[in-house]
Image (spheres, rainbow, N blue to C red):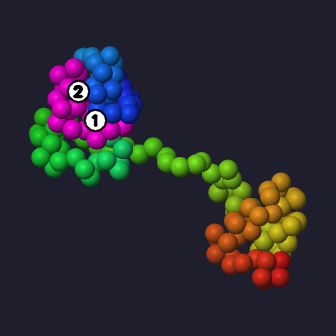
Amino acid sequence: MRVEVKARNNAELLKKLNEVLNEDVTEVYINLRPTKEILVHILERAPNVRKISCPPSLYPKVSKKIIHALSQMGIQLVPEGYPRGRPRKYDEKTVMAVMRLMEQGVPPKEISSRMGIPLRTVYYMLERAGVGDARKAGY
């Protein structure tokens, strides 16, 4: 069984771990840096745990000794990423469609009205794709 525990500080994390961990848990995700205290708490409450994961940004801050000790016990400590930041409004397929229309010689204003995308966004997509400044190119 997998458990995800998210908290704002270590005290809150320990409290939440008390509530959710039991012998059935085999995987644990925590959103804070796994300190010795937190890891000992997890191992006491969930003796069958085989995988502990944390955010990729915090993984390098974990002591190599801790990672080695856990691996000797047969427990993996791994970084697990969740997408960060604002999700994209237009997927890659839409961007490629804009590029194809541009290659066919369709002006950005026409692309904007055909696809229902703001003109400024069309220019932004073209700029990001390396087309350069489409406005200066005569579009």
**Range drawn in magenta:** 31-51
Residue 65 is left or right of residue 78, and the answer is: left
Estimate the x, y position of residue 129 in percent, counting from the top left.
64, 70
> At x 64% / y 57%, what residue is drawn?
92
> At x 23% / y 22%, what residue is drawn?
46
Residue 138 is left or right of residue 48, and the answer is: right
Is residue 122 among the parts visible in the rendering?
A: yes
Where residue 52 is drawn, which disc sits there?
Answer: 1
Estimate the x, y position of residue 65 in percent, counting from the top left.
12, 46
Quadrant of the image containing the N terminus: top left
> At x 80% / y 58%, what residue is drawn?
118
Q: Nearer the viewer, residue 81 or 102?
A: 81
Is residue 100 among the parts visible in the rendering?
A: no
Q: What amino acid type should be assigned to the residue bearing mark 1?
A: Ile
Residue 109 against residue 84 in the figure, above or below? below
Residue 105 against residue 93 in the figure, above or below? below
- Magenta segment includes 33: yes
| Element at label 1 | strand
Q: Nearer the viewer, residue 38 or 114?
A: 38
Where residue 42 is drawn, which disc sits there?
Answer: 2
| Element at label 2 | helix
> At x 86% / y 67%, what residue is drawn?
109
Estimate the x, y position of residue 41 in percent, counting from the top left.
20, 26
Residue 94 is left or right of residue 20, and the answer is: right
Contact? badges 1 and 2 (CB < 8 Å) = yes
